[in-house]
Each structure stands twice: as structure tokens, then as C-alpha cells.
Image (cartoon, rainbow, N blue to C red):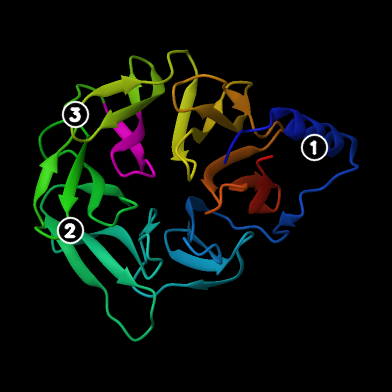
């Protein structure tokens, strides 16, 4: 993605308000409960959690969804960069388990890691080497890294405040996440090798579920700046914060298409949650 074009998006939003333009990829049915959303690396599928169960639907709007077996009680999952399996966490024998769940129906899921402490919101590095997840095993909720080859788990952040909703950068060298700094959830980026923490936003607004663009120069996220929740994009350095949606609905869980030309997000409408894909140019 060379550049984000807010002028083009403003034009689309004006036409939408006038009733002259409707997003081309919109599911009209609606889901009652959505808690995560991810676009497959090959661009053909959406992965989402609906009422605590994972589903796969056709991209870009989630049509013809099918429930994935053994995923009852799962509210968060991510694709592996190969697109052949997903990762998620479930309660397991008095503790918690991190699972590798193949999308081929003739393969069984495998346990990657088990802990007596809670784990949540796992994400896989684009290079396929690591999984990052949240845990409070050492006190406050922090980010942990698991090396998929050695199975070693290492604490990445050491904060005195909760962190949430991580996402890897395309080069796998850093993670963006939100942290409860004072009374506000702000955006942060942590460099994995240097363990250096950078605060991207410093304002009284709320941010959630940040996602790097495929080239790593933009971050999309949900924010509540005008009363309702909308999707915003911001440059990696914290510049050019721009609304991507502006309407009366809650818009959440943005995820980029593999080529960076679109963002799909979930929108809470009267009929339930629907998935909308919009061009980024």
C-alpha cells in the first residue's frame, strides 16, 4: 500500500450519507455476536468468532459460513501465514491450552502449549516462527512469546498496566497492541529484539484491535472519538490519524486484505453484526 487516500473515503462517506452509494461487499443477514475477525493469507476466507464458536466464511463478506468443530467457547483466533491452520486458546483440564487447529478436515488439532495460568488472544508472526499471546502468569496481563520450534515461552513486556489485542508487524520484528495507560487505552508498539516500548497515541480516546497493513506503514483500529466506535487508520509513526468509517454504528475488528487494497470490518447493525469491505484508495 503506497498511500492511504482519505479524500476518496470522504467522497464515499458523503455519498453513503446521501443514500447514493452502498458498500459493494455487505452481508445483509447479520450475526448476533462477533468477537474477532481475520482475513486468510490467500484472500479467499474470513475467520470469525460468532457466539463463542469459530466460523469460516467466503471473503470479503463472510457468506456461507461453516462452524469449525471443537471451537465452542472460543472468542479469538488467527490464521497461520500458510493459511493451513489457525491458533486459539481454550480452557483445558483446569488450565488453558494453546491449539494448532488444521483447516483440513482429515487432520486433528494439536496442543502447542499448556499452562495453569490464563492465556488469551494468540497471534502468529508472519514468518511463522513465533506465537504471541496474553497471560497474567507473572502478575499483570502482559505479552508472551512462544518459539514454535523450541516451544520456549518468554515474557515480552513488563508493564504495570493491562495490555490487550496484539498484532505482529509484517516483518515479525514488533507487535502493536493497546495498553491501559491511566484511564485510556492507547496504542503501543514493542520491538521484540530490543524490548523497547513506543507509545503511538497519547490522547483521551479509546483504541482497540489494532492491525498492521501488509506493508507495515499503516495501522487500522477501532476508536471511540465521536461518541460511537469507528474504524481509524494511523501511520506507524503516529501521524495522519484518519477516520475510515463515520456512521452511527459500532464498527470493529478491522483486518486488511492480503494485498492491502481493502479493509474488512464488522459493523453492529439493527439486524446484527455484518461484515463490510471497503477499498483503501
| Residue nearer the viewer, 262 or 121 | 262
Circle nearer the N terminus (3, 2): 2
| Residue nearer the viewer, 238 or 221 | 238
Q: Which residue is mark 3?
A: 195
Tell which tag, 1 or 3, sits nearer the viewer: 3
Q: Residue at x 19, y 21 (%)?
A: 160
Q: Which residue is mark 2?
A: 148
Q: Which residues are magenta?
A: 162-178
Contact between marks 3 and 2 (CB within 8 A): the answer is no
Secondary structure type for disc 3: loop
> Relative to 57, is 148 above or below?
above
| Residue nearer the viewer, 33 or 240 | 240
Secondary structure type for disc 2: loop
Q: Main secondary structure of the magenta part?
A: strand
Q: Residues within 10 Å of mark 1 (few under 14, many from 20)?
A: some
Q: Which residue is mark 1?
A: 12
Q: Position of residue 30 (x, y in %)?
A: 65, 57
Q: Position of residue 16 (x, y in %)?
A: 83, 39
Distance CA(mark 1)–CA(mark 2): 43 Å
Circle nearer the N terminus (1, 2): 1
Amino acid at each position: 500500500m503506497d498511500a492511504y487516500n482519505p479524500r476518496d473515503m470522504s467522497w464515499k462517506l458523503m455519498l453513503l450519507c446521501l443514500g447514493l452509494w452502498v458498500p459493494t461487499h455487505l452481508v445483509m443477514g447479520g450475526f448476533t455476536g462477533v468477537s474477532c475477525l481475520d482475513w486468510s493469507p490467500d484472500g479467499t476466507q474470513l475467520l470469525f468468532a460468532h457466539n463463542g464458536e469459530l466460523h469460516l466464511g467466503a471473503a470479503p463478506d463472510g457468506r456461507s459460513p461453516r462452524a469449525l468443530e471443537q471451537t465452542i467457547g472460543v472468542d479469538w483466533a488467527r490464521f497461520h501465514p500458510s493459511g493451513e491452520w489457525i491458533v486459539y486458546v481454550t480452557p483445558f483440564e483446569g488450565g488453558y491450552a494453546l491449539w494448532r487447529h488444521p483447516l483440513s478436515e482429515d487432520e486433528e488439532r494439536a496442543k502447542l502449549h499448556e499452562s495453569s495460568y490464563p492465556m488469551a488472544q494468540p497471534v502468529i508472526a508472519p514468518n511463522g516462527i513465533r506465537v504471541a499471546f496474553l497471560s497474567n502468569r507473572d502478575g499483570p496481563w502482559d505479552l508472551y512469546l512462544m518459539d514454535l520450534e523450541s516451544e520456549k515461552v518468554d515474557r515480552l513486556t513488563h508493564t504495570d498496566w493491562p495490555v490487550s489485542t496484539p498484532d505482529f508487524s509484517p516483518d515479525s520484528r514488533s507487535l502493536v497492541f493497546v495498553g491501559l495507560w491511566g484511564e485510556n487505552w492507547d496504542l503501543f508498539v514493542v520491538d521484540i529484539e530490543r524490548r523497547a516500548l513506543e507509545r503511538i497515541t497519547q490522547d483521551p480516546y479509546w483504541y482497540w484491535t489494532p492491525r498492521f497493513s501488509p506493508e507495515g506503514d499503516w495501522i487500522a483500529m477501532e476508536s471511540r472519538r465521536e461518541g460511537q466506535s469507528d474504524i481509524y487508520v494511523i501511520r506507524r509513526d503516529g501521524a495522519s490519524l484518519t477516520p475510515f468509517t463515520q456512521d452511527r454504528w459500532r464498527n470493529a475488528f478491522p483486518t486488511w486484505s492480503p494485498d492491502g487494497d481493502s479493509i474488512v470490518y464488522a459493523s453492529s447493525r439493527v439486524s446484527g453484526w455484518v461484515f463490510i469491505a471497503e477499498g483503501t484508495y
